[in-house]
Amino acid sequence: MDLSVYFKSVIDMDRCAVVICDLSHEIIYMNPAACARYVKWGGAGLVGKSLLDCHNAVSRERIRQVLDWFRESDTHNIIYTSRNDKEDKDVYMVALRDDNGGLIGYYEKHEYRAREKEPLYHFGRE
């Protein structure tokens, strides 16, 4: 069974933006939420471009530092990078590793802290 279609679906169904980069910082995938969130900067057209080009000098250096930290140990896999009070979320960078623990890339994980407003088991019916 090819699980890749299932893993892609997990990412695509996430309401949070997911931008996946390889070790050269090339954006290799954006889920639909990321394409919509970053539409004014190019949306899906950012795939194939450098993530570093989307950040200022300070942020570029931080991204490089995190990648170096990920490379130090296969136990270095997630780091808290910022808080966005306006959106009530915390942001992390997460290492992506192959089956042998080798670093293959990274992505940014958004965790919203606001309480869900949707009713439990609301199927969108009146």
Image: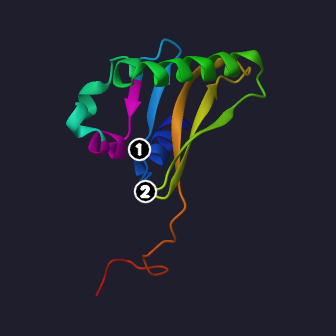
Q: Is residue 27 above or below residue 94?
A: above
Of residues 31 and 37, the one drawn nearer to the viewer in this rendering? 37
**What residue span does the magenta drawing correspond to?**
28-37
User: Closer to the observer: label 1 or label 2?
Assistant: 2
Query: What residue occupies the far top of the structure in this picture?
Result: 24
Left or right side of 76 for 18: left
Q: Position of residue 58 (x, y in %)?
A: 48, 22
Question: Please, which colouring scheme is shown?
Answer: rainbow
Asked whether 29 falls inside the magenta stretch, the response is yes
Instruction: Tally the marks.
Output: 2
Asked whether 92 falls inside the magenta stretch, the response is no
Which residue type does callout 2 highlight?
Glu
Q: Position of residue 86 (x, y in %)?
A: 42, 56
Q: Position of residue 122 (x, y in %)?
A: 41, 79
Which residue type does callout 1 highlight?
Ala
- Residue at 24 percent across and 27 percent down: it is 45
Q: Main secondary structure of the magenta part?
A: helix
Which quadrant is the C terminus positioned in? bottom left
Left or right side of 79 for 2: left
Residue underneath mark 1: 17
